[in-house]
């Protein structure tokens, strides 16, 4: 079996244990025992144990979101509504909230915070790519950073939402998207203002040199320092 096959087996076996033990070593060992795999094979596929399974669970949700985006007709929606729909599809792909709640707890730990941030960034990057984003400058970063904030706050609201069909969550999401659109309108007006645009000419000239990561670059968060 390949590593992805092993990881998929372990993930499915781990899910029933997560509600009780979280994404922990106990869950990982229980999953290994349930699948009948050797610990050596399991560790080869998941060197960090349950952390790798939690990330695999997140990626599984991303894949389900993208599949639904391909199936749904979003052409009739405004662009902001398409973004909101994508976030909603991502949350609706989750079958058990407790798995996400335990994941939030895991990635809130300082030594796993980068993994959590990378996972959220990856989700937002997939959303923008699926919606046909063509930006390759500073906007590439600001779009993903802004959506990461919207997505993260919506997830936290959703975890505590007990309204029918998560209606309150979708209202919350719409408000967050509206807030972002207001900011974009303010930025557009500032660019049209000669005084403001003149004052910002220096900083903007620096930002204009920023480009999105090179195609095919993998690993780590986007951007890096070089000597």
Image: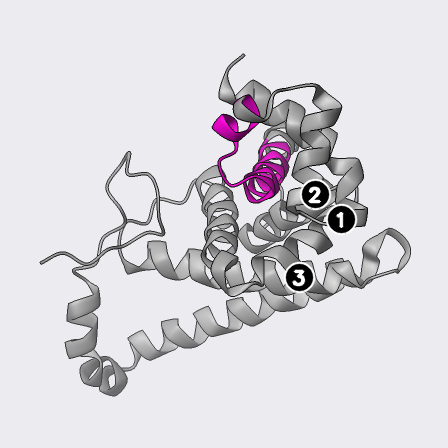
| Numbered tag placed on residue 154 in the rendering | 3
In the rendered view, tell whether residue 29 sits above or below residue 24: above
Q: Pointer 3: residues within 10 angstroms few (<14), some, or many (20+)?
A: many
**Res 195 → quadrant:** bottom left
Nearer the observer: mark 1 or 2; the answer is: 2
Asked if one can make out residue 74 in the rendered structure from this viewpoint, the answer is no
Q: Answer with mark 2 or mark 3, whichever residue precedes in sequence.
A: 2
Nearer the observer: mark 3 or 1; the answer is: 1
Residue 132 in the image, given as x and y percentages of width and height = 43, 40
113 falls in the magenta region: no
Asked if one can make out residue 174 in the rendered structure from this viewpoint, the answer is yes
Q: CA distance from mark 1 to mark 2?
A: 7 Å
Residue at far right of view: 164
Q: Nearer the viewer, residue 171 or 107?
A: 107
| Numbered tag placed on residue 21 in the rendering | 1
Contact, CB < 8 Å: mark 1 with mark 2?
yes
Q: Nearer the viewer, residue 114 or 180?
A: 114
Q: Which residues are magenta?
A: 41-66
Q: Residue at x 22, y 80 (%)?
A: 200
Q: Mark 2 = which residue? A: 26
Q: Nearer the viewer, residue 166 or 23?
A: 23
């Amino acid at each position: 079996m390949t590593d992805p096959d092993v990881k998929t087996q372990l993930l499915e076996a781990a899910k029933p244990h997560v509600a009780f033990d979280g994404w922990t070593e106990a869950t990982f060992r229980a999953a290994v025992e349930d699948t009948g795999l050797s610990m050596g094979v399991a560790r080869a596929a998941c060197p960090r144990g349950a952390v790798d399974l939690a990330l695999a669970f997140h990626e599984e949700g991303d894949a389900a979101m993208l599949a639904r985006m391909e199936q749904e007709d979003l052409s009739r929606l405004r662009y902001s509504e398409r973004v909101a729909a994508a976030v909603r599809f991502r949350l609706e792909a989750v079958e058990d909230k407790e798995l996400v709640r335990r994941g939030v707890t895991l990635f809130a730990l300082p030594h796993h915070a980068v993994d959590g941030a990378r996972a959220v960034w990856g989700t937002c990057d997939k959303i923008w790519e699926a919606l046909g984003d063509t930006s390759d400058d500073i906007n590439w970063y600001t779009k993903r950073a802004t959506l990461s904030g919207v997505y993260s706050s919506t997830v936290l609201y959703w975890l505590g939402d007990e309204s029918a069909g998560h209606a309150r969550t979708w209202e919350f999401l719409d408000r967050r998207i509206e807030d972002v659109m207001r900011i974009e309108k303010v930025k557009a007006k500032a660019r049209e203002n000669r005084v403001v645009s003149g004052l910002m000419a220096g900083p903007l000239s620096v930002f204009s040199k920023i480009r999105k990561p090179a195609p095919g670059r993998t690993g780590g968060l986007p951007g890096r320092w070089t000597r």
